Amino acid sequence: GAFDGYMRKNDCFQDAARHAQSRCEVSHMSEDERIQVAIRLTLCELATARHHTPPLECSPFVNNVGPHIPHLAVGDCVDALSRSAQFWSSYSGYLREIPQLCFAFRRWMEIDTAKDIYRNITLEKLALIR
């Protein structure tokens, strides 16, 4: 698919994008899922700035790409991010952009599906000609 090469890379942003994509494919993300993806992306951004340490309350998200983070831990992390204007700005920006990210993922999946259908039809026609 369109994201295969991008997703094979192993870094924080790709892990967060992979998590988002898996939720976008299944259905519309719940508010809690959008919040978790925004937190993950914010922490990736903070990791690129050497002089910024992520809040301790957000430690459940560090190196954890699974969906099993307790609701209370999510709230604690969001509260911690809100104490820094810079952290909050990053978090709220990512939170606002997640619907567009999901739209892009779904669009790319539709394009990949259309390409697969076209390829299959072409192969069938070639088989008929032979």
Image (cartoon, rainbow, N blue to C red):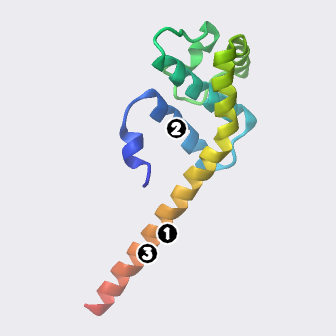
Q: In this figure, which residue is indicated by the disc labeled 2? A: 17
Give coordinates of residue 63: x percent, y percent.
48, 20
- For badge 3, the amino acid type reads Tyr
Give coordinates of residue 29: x percent, y percent.
69, 42
Question: Secondary structure under badge 1?
Answer: helix
Picture quadrant where residue 77 is located? top right
Q: In this figure, which residue is indicated by the disc labeled 1? A: 114
Q: In this figure, which residue is indicated by the disc labeled 3? A: 118
Task: Pick whichever of labels 2 and 1 is earlier in the sequence.
Answer: 2
Query: Residue 37 vs residue 126: left or right?
Result: right
Give whichever of 56, 130 is nearer the camera: 56
Residue at x 49%, y 8% (from the top left corner): 51
- For badge 1, the amino acid type reads Ala
Residue at x 52%, y 56% (from the top left corner): 108
Give coordinates of residue 96: x percent, y percent.
70, 36
Question: Looking at the picture, does residue 126 appear above or below residue 30?
Answer: below
Picture quadrant where residue 75 is located? top right
Give whichever of 85, 54 is nearer the camera: 85
Give whichever of 16, 68 is nearer the camera: 16
Mark 3–mark 1 distance (CA, rounded to whole Å): 6 Å
Mark 3–mark 2 distance (CA, rounded to whole Å): 28 Å
- For badge 2, the amino acid type reads Ala
Residues at circles 3 and 1 in contact by the CB criterion of under 8 Å: yes
Question: Secondary structure under badge 3?
Answer: helix
Image quadrant where one finds the N terminus? bottom left
